[in-house]
Amino acid sequence: MRVKRKLLEKGIAYVVLGLFAVSTLFPYYCMLVMGTHENAELFSGLKLWFGQSLCANFTRLLESDYLRSFLNSLLIAVPATLLTLLSSSMGGYALAKYQFRARKFLISFVYITLMLPGSLGTIAWVWEMKQFDWINTYWPFIIPAMGNTYAVYWFLQLSKGAIPNEILDSARVDGAGEFRIFFQIASPHLRAGATSLGLLNFVGAWNSYLGPSLILKRPKLYTVPISIATMGSQFRSEYSTQILGMAVATIPLLIVFACTSKYFIAGIAGGAVKE
C-alpha cells in the first residue's frame, strides 16, 4: 500500500508540474503561431495553429534591418555582462574578505543604494552621458553597468558563505598574491553564483528598452526592442512581423539559459546566504 501511495503521489506531482510547464510555454507557443499569420488574421480571434505567412513575415523582418539590431544587442549585452561580473565579483569579494577603514561605510552605501529605484536617476544618467559625448554610442550601457551595486551585494553575500577564510590564509602562507588568490582560488567558489547573476544581467541588457530609446537616435544603432517597436510605417503597424521578431529575439535567451541551467538554481541559493 505504501508503495502504491508513493507512486500515486509521484504521478500527481508529475501531472501538476507538467501542467505548470505547459502553462509557462503556452504564451511562447502563441507568439510563434501569431508570427505566421497576417495582420488581419490576428484580429479574428486567438490563433492556435500556424498560418501561411511565415515566409512573408520573415522577409519583412529581414528588410527592417533586424539582423543588425540583433548584433547591436549582442554588442551591448555580452560586454556589459562580462564586465559587470568581473568588477562586481572583485568588489563583493573585497568587501567580504578584507578589513579596511572604509569597509563598513561602503557596505552601508551598497545597502542604501539598493533601496533607490533605478529610474530615479534616469535624467541625471542621460545628462551625464551627454557630457561624456556618449550619445549614439554603446558605452552608456557597458561602462556604468560595472558599478552595479546589486551585483556587488550578490557577491558580497556569496563570498561570505562560499569561500572559507582558511583557504585564503593557506594560499597567502604559500606566497600567492592577492590577484592569484582571487582568480585561481576564490573564483571557482563563485562560479555558480556568477553564472546565475550573469544570466539575469544578460536578460536585462538584452530586453532593455528605456535606456537605448533615450541614448540611441540613429536607426543603425537600434537594439532589438527598439527595432521591433519601430517596425512598420506611419500608417500601418506590422503586428505579425513584430511578434515574429519577439519570438526570434527570445532564442538567444533560451540558448543561454539552457547552457547555464545547471548552475542557475545553485547560484540563486548561494546568493541568498545571509550575513
Image (cartoon, rainbow, N blue to C red):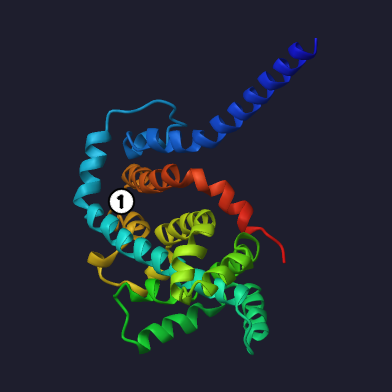
Percent across and percent down for residue 199 are 47, 54
Q: In the structure shown, which secondary structural element does the residue marked by tag 1 occupy?
A: loop
Kindly identify the residue that appears in the image at 32 percent across and 34 percent down. 36
Vertical relation: 29 (above or below) 244: above
Q: Residue furthest right?
A: 1
Amino acid type, residue under disc 1 in the picture: Arg
Vertical relation: 51 (above or below) 126: above
Residue designated by label 1: 236
Can I make out residue 150 in this image?
no
Q: Residues within 10 Å of mark 1 (few under 14, many from 20)?
A: few
Q: Which of 126/107 is in front? A: 107
> Which quarter shows the N terminus?
top right
Q: Which of 261/40 is in front? A: 261
> Which quarter shows the C terminus?
bottom right
Quadrant of the rendered image containing residue 137:
bottom left
Can I make out residue 266 in this image?
yes
Kindly identify the residue that appears in the image at 56 percent across and 76 percent down. 94
Kindly identify the residue that appears in the image at 25 percent across and 47 percent down. 61
Percent across and percent down for residue 273 are 68, 59
Q: Which of 262/11 is in front? A: 262
Percent across and percent down for residue 219 are 25, 66
Q: Is residue 271 left or right of residue 208?
A: right
Q: Is residue 58 left or right of residue 19?
A: left
Q: Which of 218/154 is in front? A: 154
Percent across and percent down for residue 141 are 39, 71
Number of marks in the rendered image: 1
Vertical relation: 9 (above or below) 205: above
